[in-house]
Amino acid sequence: MDIDKLAKEAQQYQLQSVTRRHFLRECVAGIGGIALGSMLGGLGGCSSSTGRPLDAGIASGSLNPMAPRAPHFAAKAKRVIYLHMAGAPSQLELFDYKPELHKLHNKPCPESILAGKKFAFIRGVPKMLGPQAQFKQHGQSGAWVSDYLPHFSKVVDEVSFLKAMHTEQFNHGPAQLFMHTGHARLGRPSMGSWVTYGLGTENSNLPGFVVLTSGGKTPDAGKSVWGSGFLPSVYQGVQCRSKGDPVLYISDPEGMGRDLKKQTIDAINAVNQEEYNSYGDPETLARIAQYEMAFNMQVAVPEVMDIDSEPEYIHELYGTEPGKESFANNCLLARKLVEQGVRFVQLFDWGWDSHGTSAREAIDVGFRDKCKEIDRPMTALLMDLKQRGLLDETLVVWGGEFGRTPMQENRDDKDMPFLGRDHHTDAYTVWLAGGGIKPGVSYGETDDIGFSGIGGRTSVNDLHATMLHLLGFDHERLIYEFQGRPFRLTDVGGELISAIV
Amino acid sequence: MENGGDLFLFLGRWHPLLVHLPIGILFISFVIALVARRPAYSGLAPAVPFTLFVGAISAVFASVLGFLLASFGGYDNRTLGFHQWFGIAVAVLSILVWWLYHRLAERRAGMRSLVKWRFSIFCMLMVLLCVTGHYGGTLTHGKGYLTDAMPPALGGLFGIEQVEEPFVIENVQEAAVYDGLIQPILARRCQSCHGATKQEGGLALHQQASLLTGGDGGAVIVPSELNESELYTRLTLPVGDEKRMPPKGRTPITPEEIALIGWWIEHGAPFEGLVADVEQPEEIATILAQLEAGNAKQAMPEAPPLDATAVQRLVERGIKVMPVAQGSNYVMISAINAPDFNDEDAEVLVDLKDNIVQLQLGRTAVTDVGMAHIGELTILKKLHLEHTLVTDEGLKALAACLQLQYLNLSSTAIGNTGMDYLKSLPELTHVYLYETKVTGDAIADIQQSQPTLVVDTGGYVLPTS
């Protein structure tokens, strides 16, 4: 490319960047014009106010959007590990024991229950499906856990259950969005983004929000469940691969040394800083921070994502097999990441949608195998965090995007080849542990067949409000101004679930 | 722009002064227009368009200066938005009103209908002017500058909420259970609608007699029968239920206050006797204790300001200094990005000894030498020393850290001797000893002197199936 053409392009670019507004601004004679022009231009524009004090980042003294920041009040939890079972596991085979449902097994579902209800696949009058697992009470807290989770049942005294969670969405995509962004449609920031927006990152060499997936697929709602929505994009989740290079192209290309790389990034950032000084776009700061972070990550990420170096007994505890993409590997990685100060680790495990259309989707076959897959690693995660003194300040949350029906699914009003349950919004179970959660509590109660919550009902907004509370935030005050109104994770809802904190 | 910046800011700063011109001029114009409507003063009428013209010009000028000032930032965006747009509306409207009072407009056939309404539009302009002025005042003096000084009775008239006083009862066990505890809760939460002045649904809760009589639907309290007592069931309906009390938009009642009312009804709703006379389950005892203490967090005195030099030195070493909460001088220190944190760095921490409550030194190069300095951090509550070279000797220095609650020693060379040094720490609740040389005897020993201490030696295994 000849140099003249480059120079011309640069000049063009320069001219394009001088907009009407800049011209008027520079022109003293047009003071009145400036005012009117900009005022009209500002109509419907977005406000850059963040609702977040700037003084909090005393440690950084810079404009770095990832600098650690103080919460509203002293926090009990510093970090979160969120285990999401994409597809929605059946609460009726795991935690919500319903002996009455057993008696109704194979009997037609009473009309009174179906009246006015809509289901994703159930049509006509389905049959009731009794619990397919054996239940027992465990630990000093006497929590009900089924024989599908033999290991987990030994650590129930560390855990608190929300038995009457409910949601508004009965399809996976919207329900997952609702669960992770507080809104069923696209465009809102995910919980992890809100948390890193509020707290920044403690470790400047690692992202504040890391996402790991297993089960062969990413969640139905796509990457929006860890997106940053309207928050600056620096707060979006960074997905790491648990197999192969954790981040693609993490190593330097041949001939590019660390020093040269550093100089390159410093130069680019200096230019970007100029850009920020003249335009003040937070996305420019995001870009600067991301270059810095990427440079640091080149060293830090391969180190923290390497589970080979873990001792053998840790692999035995988690049931990990290095080199594979598995929920177990991701649990171990989650521990390593929080140990290194990552704020929010989001795990997605796919394959929990037990409709009964195939053996893999059967409550008594595929679902049971999935339970076996997660039982050891998630139990190991709690134990390992505990012995390292990390559970104290790490909030662990487990759940799906909704529950499953007490009725057997009869897709298109026909009998199904295997036992399955349909999507259900009225009742499901979420458990939380560590990070200031009162252990051994079971909050909320469902009716005799586990269809609806009859006491202690908790919403997705309530769960978010409680998580933010443990992280030191008043959920009504962690806001971001966008398109002329303040937004928050809990939107206009959410109440602290004080029974479990 | 960089060269012109100072000039614009300078011009902008005249805005707070010059805004008083349109306020004064438009106001006097309005007064003239008002009195000129009476035949006796109709001679004043020609002054109206003239003063309006001057007022409108000054309003436009003030708006432009205001816009310049606003572009330099530093104001609350929402209030600024209101002030800006109302201000522009004042300028635009004052031009319109001037035109309507101008004799040219009177002659135009198309304008006749508007001219008829010109005084009403002028009234609207005055309202807008007041609102704009109010938002402007809020920007300079801060929210509530006006209303804070307002007598409470007057504030109620405007629906301005008073900031809630924390509910504190000194010596709660000795308080009268009804007069001292339950009645004050009802007074706080219910009696603005169910009291002496207003009895919604025929219910008044300010007197024993009327409380027992109940409302239009009958009694609201059935002693000892919680589920029969409407007073209680109405409080516990799901959020969003239109029968839930207090209704939407009113200050909500706290879960603790609901629990206390429930507890009182359950125990026969006594009107006599002391709090101590009524049987108290554990959770009620906790709530009562909290009432006595008020807000325990407020009791903790604020830390002195941070030593800027010390903070600077730590930050330069890659060490994070993070306030525990916004506006607090208590800090957490983390050396997570400074694995080479050493004993000299530890010495710097001493300059922040009245500020540091949490210290994360896991996986650093700190040794027993540095521990001597860490021992001077007497308000330390949480200390991470995992994966360090600290030994039993080093723990000796912690004797003065009397507030220490959490100590992580996993993967260190700590042994049984080290445990002896921890016995004198009264607040210690959690010690982590995974991968250390401490044995069961020493743990049993320390737990004998500190029964509430949780010692975690880890090494958990899951059976292989």
Image (tube, coloured by chain):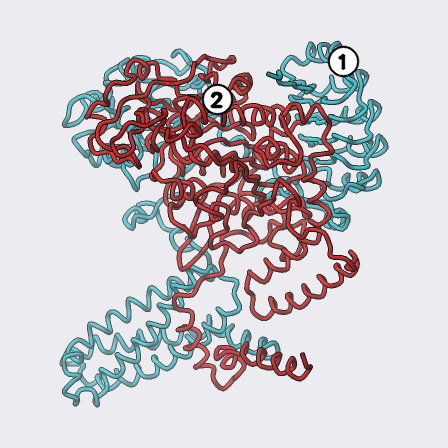
Chain colours: A red, B cyan
Residue B252 percent coordinates (x, y): 34, 36
* Residue located beneath label 2 in the image: B289
Which quarter of the figure has residue B110?
bottom left
- For marks 2 and 1 on the same chain, the one whose residue lies earlier in the sequence: 2
Q: Nearer the viewer, residue B370 or B463?
A: B463
Label 2: how many Cα within 10 Å (few below 14, some 14–19, many 20+): some
- To the question of a shared chain for discs 2 and 1, the answer is yes
Q: Which mark is residue B439?
A: 1
For the residue labelled by badge 2, is the local secondary structure a helix, a strand or a loop?
helix
Left or right: B142, with B5 as reference point = left
Residue in the image at 61% along x and 69% along y: A275
Residue in the image at 31% along x and 73% along y: B27
Amino acid found under the numbered disc labelled 2: Ala
What is the distance, in whole Å, between disc 2 and disc 1 at their CAs? 39 Å
Which quarter of the figure has residue B82?
bottom left
Label 1: how many Cα within 10 Å (few below 14, some 14–19, many 20+): few
Left or right: B142, with B248 as reference point = right
User: Is there any visible trace of residue B170 in the rendered image?
Assistant: no
Instruction: Please report, as a chain letter, where disc 2 is located.
Output: B
Residue A313 percent coordinates (x, y): 70, 23
For the residue labelled by badge 1, is the local secondary structure a helix, a strand or a loop?
loop
User: Is there any visible trace of residue B40 in the rendered image?
Assistant: yes
Q: Quadrant of the N terminus of chain B?
A: bottom right
Residue A189 percent coordinates (x, y): 47, 49
Amino acid found under the numbered disc labelled 1: Thr
Left or right: A122, with A496 as reference point = left
Left or right: A48, with B112 as reference point = right
